[in-house]
């Protein structure tokens, strides 16, 4: 057990949990640049002064999660003991974010290598730089949560049996709506291997709901597509945060999903001054 200082870089879209009602897969980087996954974490149950943002440093007591074999997985000791620290902004073309994340980590470019690493349980989180984003795919899916899980959560809330009878939702609990779309990136790696992976970042879900407030579902999806395909993939320096699922970590043909994007602007080449004196 130790207090870790973590730069939060990933918050996945919430999923239902029979034990915690709702969980958010959260991950980030230690000061030395190494990955760490914080799971389980019922994010929306946190008090307002404990709810961290992406690219914010936090201090949190963690211990290795004995139920999760993935090397980077740690569980919080006390979710009410999270200290919020400074947030890293986007000044100077994301200079500080680049330094903390890209300069201290391996940037992977080959899918076969990271799949093999997962099978050998070497790591389960990776920064991936695709050679090319081929497409952004949106597929309709069931707009409702799995009925058995939803009923289990509702029954546990009625019985007061969630969270070891701790009232983690003092204002009442309302299910996060399930996304009615599956969003995916199709991309190539450095050997032209094609992969199509789910995007499970909270931000893409929130973007869809925000767009839906003004448009019909098809127009909302069109705007999400424009952001992820034409903005992030065509005009930004796009990296993918990849993470394996616990179920498929060491056995799936490709156990990774996209748990976040890192999309700083391309660094502008500074032009020498026309009036610079010769050395």
Image (cartoon, helix red, strand yellow):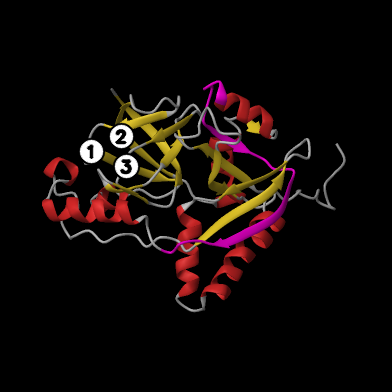
Q: CA distance from mark 2 to mark 3?
A: 12 Å
Q: Position of residue 248 (x, y in %)?
A: 50, 34
Residue 25 quadrant: top left
* Closer mark to the observer between disc 1 and disc 3: 3
- Mark in front: 2 vs 3: 3
Asked whether the residues under the numbered discs 2 and 3 touch, taking CB atoms below 8 Å apart as contact, a structural biologist would say: no
Q: Nearer the viewer, residue 196 or 129?
A: 196
Task: Measuring from the top left, give residue 208's x and y in whole percent.
Answer: 49, 66
Whether residue 149 is situated above or below residue 251 in the rendered picture: below
Q: Position of residue 18 (x, y in %)?
A: 27, 46
User: Which comes before the other along the chain, label 2 or label 3?
Assistant: 3
Does the magenta-highlighted stretch encompass residue 156? no
Left or right of residue 146: residue 245:
right
Task: Give me the disc on residue 60.
Answer: 2
Count of all numbered marks drawn on residues in the image:
3
Which class describes the residues within 10 Å of circle 3: few (<14), some (14-19), or many (20+)? Answer: some
Q: Which mark is residue 41?
A: 3
Name the foreground residue: 94 vs 29: 29
Q: Which residue is mark 1?
A: 81
Q: Circle 1: is it few (<14), some (14-19), or many (20+) Cα within 10 Å?
A: few
Is 272 placed left or right of 23 in the picture? Answer: right
- Element assignment for label 1: loop
CA–CA distance in space, label 1 to label 3: 13 Å
**Range drawn in magenta:** 119-143
Which of marks 3 and 1 precedes in the sequence? 3
Pinpoint residue 262: horizontal percent, then vertical percent: 58, 47
Q: Which image quarter holds the N terminus?
A: top left
Instruction: Find out whether the residues at labels 2 and 1 contact each other: C-beta distance under 8 Å.
Output: yes
Verify whether residue 134 appears in magenta.
yes
Which residue is found at the position 40% from the left and 60% from the top?
A: 178
């Amino acid at each position: 057990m130790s207090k870790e200082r973590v730069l939060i870089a990933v918050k996945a879209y919430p999923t239902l949990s029979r034990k915690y009602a709702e969980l958010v897969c959260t991950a980030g980087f230690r000061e030395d640049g190494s990955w760490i996954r914080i799971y389980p974490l019922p994010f929306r149950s946190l008090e307002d002064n404990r709810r961290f943002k992406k690219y914010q440093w936090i201090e949190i007591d963690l211990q290795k999660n004995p139920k999760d074999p993935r090397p980077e997985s740690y569980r919080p000791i006390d979710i009410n003991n999270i200290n919020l620290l400074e947030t890293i902004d986007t000044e100077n073309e994301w200079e500080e974010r680049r330094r903390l994340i890209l300069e201290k980590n391996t940037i992977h470019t080959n899918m076969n290598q990271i799949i093999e690493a997962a099978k050998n349980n070497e790591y389960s989180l990776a920064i991936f730089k695709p050679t090319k984003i081929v497409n952004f795919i949106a597929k309709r899916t069931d707009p409702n949560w799995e009925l058995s899980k939803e009923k289990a959560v509702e029954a546990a809330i009625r019985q007061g049996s969630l969270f070891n009878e701790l009232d983690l939702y003092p204002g009442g609990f309302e299910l996060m709506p399930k996304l009615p779309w599956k969003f995916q990136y199709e991309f190539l790696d450095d050997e032209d291997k094609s992969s199509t992976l789910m995007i499970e970042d909270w931000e893409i879900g929130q973007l869809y709901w925000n767009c839906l407030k003004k448009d019909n579902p098809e127009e909302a999806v069109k705007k999400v597509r424009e952001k992820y395909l034409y903005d992030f993939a065509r005009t930004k320096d796009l990296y993918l945060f990849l993470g394996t699922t616990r179920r498929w970590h060491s056995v799936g043909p490709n156990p990774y999903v996209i748990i976040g994007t890192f999309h700083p602007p391309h660094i502008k080449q500074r032009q020498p001054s026309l009036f610079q004196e010769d050395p």
